[in-house]
Image (tube, rainbow, N blue to C red):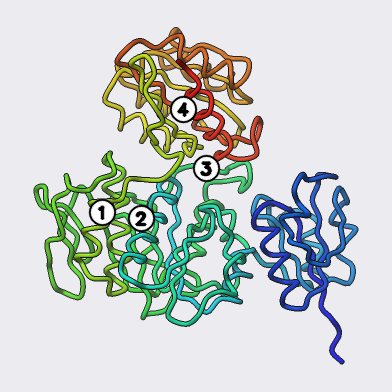
Amino acid sequence: MAKRKTALIVGMAKSGIAAAKLLYREGYRVIINDQKPEIKGLFDALCGIAYEVQLGADPMDLIDGIDLLVPSPIIPMSRQFIVEARKRGVEVISEIELGYRYSQADFVCVTGTNGKTTCTALTGEIFQNSGRNTFVLGNIGIAISEHALDTKKGDVIVAETAALQLEGNVNFHAVAAGVCNITPDHLDHFGSMENYIAAKAKIFDNQTESDVAVLNWDDPIVRRFASITKAKVLYFSRKEEVDSGMFLRGDKMVYRINGEEHELMDKDDVRIMGAHNLENAMLSALLALSQDVPAEVVRDTLESFSGVEHRIEYVCTRSGVDYINDSKGTNPASTIRAIEAMKKPTILILGGFDKHSEFDELFDAFSSNIRACVVLGDTADKIIDAATKAGYGDICHRASDFLRAVSMARDLSEEGDVVLLSPACASWDMFDNYEQRGRVFKAIVKEYK
């Protein structure tokens, strides 16, 4: 009788829980580990599977005798216990690699720094509207391992794949992969911009000549990915006509695939607002068109898709002030996009966990629309220093906590203004994730009279 294999799952967030359940169903002895000695709701989330609990333990003490290690995506692959496990012959993979191995679906993937979630949700809706059995998974909030065993041949998984997740891939293969853009992010994890870009590029590792890569022509870093993928490259551009892909001709969105040119629609008929969302629409459209989704399905979906939660999401209007939740704005470049989409005088809430981002570019993008900033969190000093350097120090107000920050933004606002939560930082100094931060913001402002 074959020896039962043992898997160690390190990190009990969504991806870790999904990995544990999948591996148990596949016959593994499962050990669960997290630095926290207690995690509320964990055992209910694991749905009664049999596992060995090692919460609060050092994972270095748990690698003896294991066959497979699945670390949380937030854990750098350079951590000592991961390096040592590999030395001992333990296979180390990411959760999305695990989900891929047990799935029968085709993977259509989106990566990049900003816009991934919108593109993933939009692409998923296009495929769903085409009638194809579609799962929208990955960094968007539902782990791939959660539904891998539910898939069958002919299905499609539209997956948001972050650099943190791609780092541990081995055989993961996308029939179509799109990259929105690349700007500095997660440098606390990767140590350098070069390492961050290399992690993003892993989405192309196993592509073949029959696959498709959709790249942002207007982003020099993304454009260079064409040299490292074997896949057929389609570009999208708001600024230039491209030989193969999608571009603007006047107000019309035009695409060229396989040497044939077609007009898709008027750019002003794309429902989600902002120039950055036009780029997102182009990327999603090309991913779908490259997989033979009819153009009319693409067009109808772009006309009806209203966006995703926590990304430039209208919450409510109180006393003539609009409240916008952009909690997904977790780096300066993302917040710049949100600022550019605002058409009214804006009170901006900034700050959070320090991912070693720089904020000079953020204040360089400020316009007269930004009337005030409320700053909080681990990055408050760094943000205020950058604001002062750029000449905006006098409009910055420091808040002691999140509730106070939202209250200060309300007090600073006037009828006709916008209060925009777009922190340009991760949430981990105050919240479990950006979703929780956004939900708390929405709950606070909806209580206002």
Which three-letter amino acid code belongs to the residue tagged 2?
A: Leu
Residue that label 4 marks = 421
The percent coordinates of residue 221 (x first, y second) are 39, 52
Q: How far is disc 4 from disc 3 in space, using C-alphas? A: 19 Å
| Residue extending furthest toward the bottom | 1
Relative to 121, is 26 above or below?
below
Q: Earlier in the sequence, mark 2 or mark 1?
A: 2
Q: What is the distance, in whole Å, between disc 2 and disc 3 at their CAs?
A: 23 Å
Q: Amino acid at mark 4?
A: Leu
Q: Label 2: how many residues lie within 10 Å, few (<14), some (14-19) or many (20+)? A: many
Q: Earlier in the sequence, mark 2 or mark 3?
A: 2
Q: Element type at marker 3?
A: loop
Residue 423 screen position, x and y as percent: 50, 29
Disc 2 + disc 1, Cβ < 8 Å: yes
| Label 4: element kind | strand
Q: Neighbour class for label 4 at 10 Å: few (<14), some, many (≥20)? A: many
Q: Nearer the viewer, mark 4 or mark 3?
A: 4
| Sequence-first disc among 3 and 1 | 3
* Number of callouts: 4
Q: Which residue is mark 1?
A: 302
Labels 4 and 2: the sequence-earlier one: 2
**Measured Cα–Cα span from mark 3 to mark 1:** 28 Å
Above or below: residue 46 compared with residue 388: below
